[in-house]
Amino acid sequence: MTAEVTGQPAGPAAGEVTEDDVRHRVQDLLAGHDPATTPRLEFLRARFDAGLAWVHYPVGLGGLGLPRQLQAVVNAELAAAGAPDNDPRRIGIGLGMAAPTILRFGTDEQRRRFLRPLWTGEEVWCQLFSEPGAGSDLASLATRAVPEAAPAGAAAADGPDGAGGAGSADGATRPGWVVEGQKVWTSSAHNARWGILLARTDPSVPKHQGLTYFIADMHAPGVEVRPLRQITGEAEFNEVFLTGVRIPDAHRLGEVGQGWQVAQTTLMNERVAIGGGAMPRESFTIGVAAQAWRRRPDLRAAHLHDPLIRLWVEWEVFRLTGIRLRQQLAAGAPGPEGSANKLVFARLNQAVTALELELTGEEGLGYDDWTSRRPAVVDLAGREAGYRYLRARGNSIEGGTSEILRNIIAERVLGLPPEPRADRDLPWKDLPR
Amino acid sequence: MSTAMSAALVSAAGEPNLLYSDVEDDLRASVRELLTDRCTPAGVLARLDLDPPHDLDLWRSLGGLGLAGLLVPEAAGGAGGTAREAAVVLEELGRFVAPVPYLSSAVTAAAALLACPDGAPSLAEDLAGTASGETIAVLAVPASWTATDPFPGALPGAARLEGDGLRGRVTSVMDAEAAGLLLVPAGRGGVPVLVAVPAGGDRLRITPRTSLDTTRRISDVELDGQGGAGAARVLAVGEAAEQAVSKALWTAAGLLASEQLGVAEWCLQTTVDYVRQRRQFARPVGSFQALKHRLADLWAGIGQARTAARYAADCLARGAPDTPVAVAMAQSMCSEVAVLAAEECIQLHGGIGMTWEHPAHLYLKRARSSHVALGTPGRHRADLARLVDLPPPG
């Protein structure tokens, strides 16, 4: 599975293109589009069209079919030239989850329609997977998508935005779909133009087989987004109610009934996105805690010293593991250890923020602000100790609970047998509720 | 911000190589092949009743592959490798809990000899002998000693070099009973010296202790005029002697982490294999989440330990300024992961794990002794705290 995710098609030029060639392409881009005078969006579009958005993507889709590690060369050159970036933290779901899924399962039309504005940030994406009744057991989800009744004798028109023709292997244009259901824990839904949606198209087969993957228009009639306030006081996430929402068949991703397999690509990339990333030593919450220890000798408690150093070590080794995983990826041998990094991160971040809260003592009894806000970007290391501690509790829940991740590691990496299960082979409609 | 702090932060700039090279993979394969053939669990268990427990035939075979001289340049009779390759050998030796004095002789003593000033008497011969494996050399320091401890010869009751040779006592020396050559840190009129003496003869007594770790025993060494009448060879004096010993102990501690990684990996793999086939309640016990989650956590911990061990080996190989931080981190993490893996191995094997006939106890004992060897994890964290400017209270 990891190999599928990371083994993006390498163009014919792979292996022959050097870092210098890539630098030349960057210089050509900069020569034609001076970052100092070119409007941001125009520059980003030009960068995409030059294949310098994500060099490992195919030519024509923002890439050059090159090895992924050459992206670092591009990013460094552009940063040195003062070029704007696409603010990746604001559009993480699009970049990290929707894009690889569209690349792998999308039609040519879908790839051309969606990837460019996704990458430039013109169109924000959200993920419509989890439901109130389907968290860890995502495959049990109940949001229904039923075929739209086609007007008698009339061929259904192409979908909007010119992205017609999806799944037209049989040459026929199929009717669209009508979606009914509720999604939850949807970050960015209130800003999003599109959502990747998993819905049940066939309740009469076992749960993993009856799902289909769609691209939902968040501006369509029947889409209602409500903020979901969480324990920090903020509303980072949303509930999304889908009432009679029409989706053209051209916005289906993958085959009908193939939704679960398509979603696996999304979810594997989510875990890569959450667990990865290069950062300097003492970044993030461990840096905050270490600085607090240095700055405030009055807070130093004897019993917290060894735990602090232990966490410092674990955090630094976690950071180095990120480098090791990136080196493995660059060497073309991605190991299974990426699936551990999110687990490790959740444990460490919870432990560090708890230690910091303990370190602050009585000051930790306060809280900066309970006002319900809608942060555009979530900074897990931001605000004050109380916020960091509370927000960290979610690290072992969001993007796959630590318990589910342990099951995945145990079964897929260690090869341990699955728990006996009754829900795998029964038709979804017959599952006990 | 102190200068120690700045150095620790700046060092992140040159990115380490944390992977295994093709050469290292090949090296691992050949060591594993030899050990699979010659160092079976049953064989190691049977050896517990032998005295001494070292497998000298296996040691000679390792020497024959050039592995005893990995840290030694070719010009000095070695194989001209680096700490990275020695680390891979140690991973495999740990995986088989091989009763050979590799860490003591090929790593610790070799690193000490390499750090001695050129031209010391017979240094070239000692180095060549150690590199070939024909000489088993042992640095005579207590097993728990670290590079940041004081020079052992400076302590009251330590070995001292006098006119008629070395006198004194060193306790808990790893692998001393197998040694042909002892490198003894001593005091000479209050000045640190590193002295080489043969390990045989009647002016020296090596008394093996009944040891927790039956595959790497400790011994007490009593020196009663060894190397006397001007025959003691002083390899290094003063600061040079101190540096040779601390260099050796940094190298040893950093590479012990790789041996601990090998120990942990064997424990995990053996346990996974066992819980897959052991059935209770009409299903494999490995299908129960309570066990799966423990093993998944252990696997994740071993992944982190691998990073820590690789980073230490890479820093040692490059002589990186971050080496003290890397070694302290590796010891903090790998010592604990190895012990956890061995304890989980015993527990998840149930009753069979408590038996003498099952090899799990060899790994628990090795993991526990390694936890103390070359500094406990807590000791290394205390060192690290100073290096990264996170001082203790007060």
Image: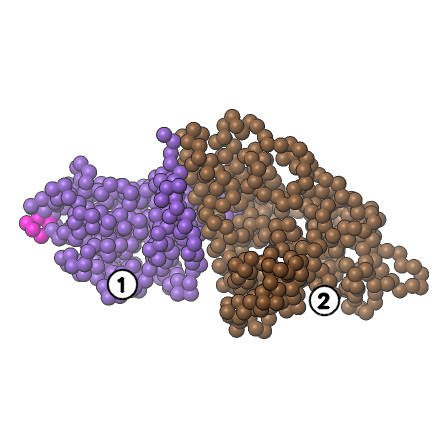
Magenta run includes residue B228: yes
Q: Residues within 10 Å of mark 1 (few under 14, many from 20)?
A: some
Task: From the rendered image, report the letter of the chain displayed in brown.
Answer: A
Residue at the extreme front = A37
Residue ID for mark 1: B73
Q: Secondary structure at mark 2?
A: helix
Cβ atoms at labels 1 and 2 below 8 Å apart: no
In this view of the protein, which residue sits in the foreground, A93 or B362?
Answer: A93
Tell me the tag on residue A108. 2
The image position of residue B132, as x and y in percent, is 24, 62
Gap in angstroms between the C-alphas marked 1 and 2: 58 Å
Q: Residue furthest right?
A: A152
Q: Which mark is residue A281?
A: none
**At 40% from the left edge and 38% from the top edge, which residue is drawn?**
B390
Magenta residues, start to end: B227-231
In what quadrant of the picture does the N terminus of chain B appear? top left
For the C terminus of chain B, the quadrant is top left
Q: Could you tell whether B137 is left or right of A426 in the image?
A: left
Residue B314 location in percent, x, y? 38, 56
Residue name at image x 73 percent, y 42 percent: A239
The answer to whether A365 is drawn above or below residue B120 in the figure is above
